[in-house]
Amino acid sequence: MWDWSKLSIVRGDITKQKADVIVNAANVSLLGGGGVDGAIHKAAGPELLKECKKFHGCPTGEARVTKAYNLNAEYIIHTPGPIWRGGFFDEESLLRKSYVSSLKKAIELKVKSIAFPSISTGGHKFPLDTASEIALNTISEFLNSEENEIENIYIVCKSEDTFNQYEESKRKLVG
Ligand code: ADP
């Protein structure tokens, strides 16, 4: 059984979160954008964009690692989550893949803490109820099945609605 006390759902701005890794809900260009992506680039500083340009983009569901520059973290893991297109284009498995790819990178980096935003539920329009269940299921199942040193996982929710939905999904899962 996975230890759910390792996972905290918090309200706030992920750019202010202290964690070894901050995950960015990027887009496939990796060149910044709106929402959490824009906030992370703004807070990290312009050197981040320079490093991101070297990747020449990233496919949906994969992840790339950069330094964290001015953030209170060691690394940023950038993952483009799927754009919701009615659920007919493998969006659920691609969202799972974004979480798993990010966690695999974090395990390789041997970090102890990681902060996720609610990937895909802003501009990418993934329905929040399903997305929050996928996020919590995927994180708990993956970390339960893989050897890892991660002690703290934060899901950082900017809005109250997002926070409440994650809390509800966690209650459904954990009881
Ligand atoms: P996506 O394109 O993957 O949907 P968005 O950034 O548009 O990404 O939205 C993903 C989630 O991140 C939304 O719940 C949005 O409210 C939230 N968000 C936006 N800015 C921040 C921030 N600074 N910290 C944490 N979450 C944020």
Image (cartoon, rainbow, N blue to C red):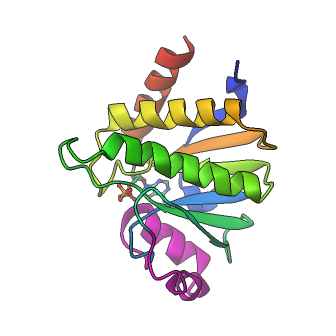
Q: Taking the image as four quarters, which one is ligand 1 found in?
A: bottom left
Q: In which quarter of the image is residue 74?
A: bottom right
Task: Please give the range of residues in magenta.
Answer: 31-58
Quarter of the image for residue 109 reads: bottom right
Q: Is residue 71 above or below residue 127?
A: below
Residue 104 against residue 134 in the figure, above or below: below
What residue is at 51 percent from the left and 76 percent from the top? Answer: 42
- Residue drawn at x 44%, y 77% as measured from the top left: 57
Q: Can residue 73 be seen in this view?
A: yes
In the image, farthest residue toward the top? 175
The image quadrant of residue 2 is top right
Q: In this view, does 67 lie to the left or right of 95?
A: right
Q: In this picture, is 82 found above or below 172?
A: below
Residue located 54% across and 62% down the image: 63
Asked whether 47 falls inside the magenta stretch, the response is: yes
Decide if residue 18 is in sight here: no
* Quarter of the figure with the N terminus: top right
Foreground: 23 or 64?
64
Residue nearest the observer in this picture, 165 or 131: 131
Seen in the picture, residue 37 relative to 133 is either above or below; the reply is below
Q: Where is residue 41 in the image (x, y as percent from the top left)?
A: 51, 75
> Residue at 79% of width from left, 48% of height from top?
112
Report x, y in % for residue 16.
62, 59
Q: In this view, does 24 lie to the left or right of 67?
A: left
Whole-percent x, y for residue 72 in the image: 71, 65
| Residue 105 at x, y percent in the picture | 66, 57
Q: Which of 108 and 126 is in front in this view?
A: 108
Residue 110 among those drawn in magenta = no
Does the magenta stretch mainly form a helix, a strand or a loop? Answer: helix
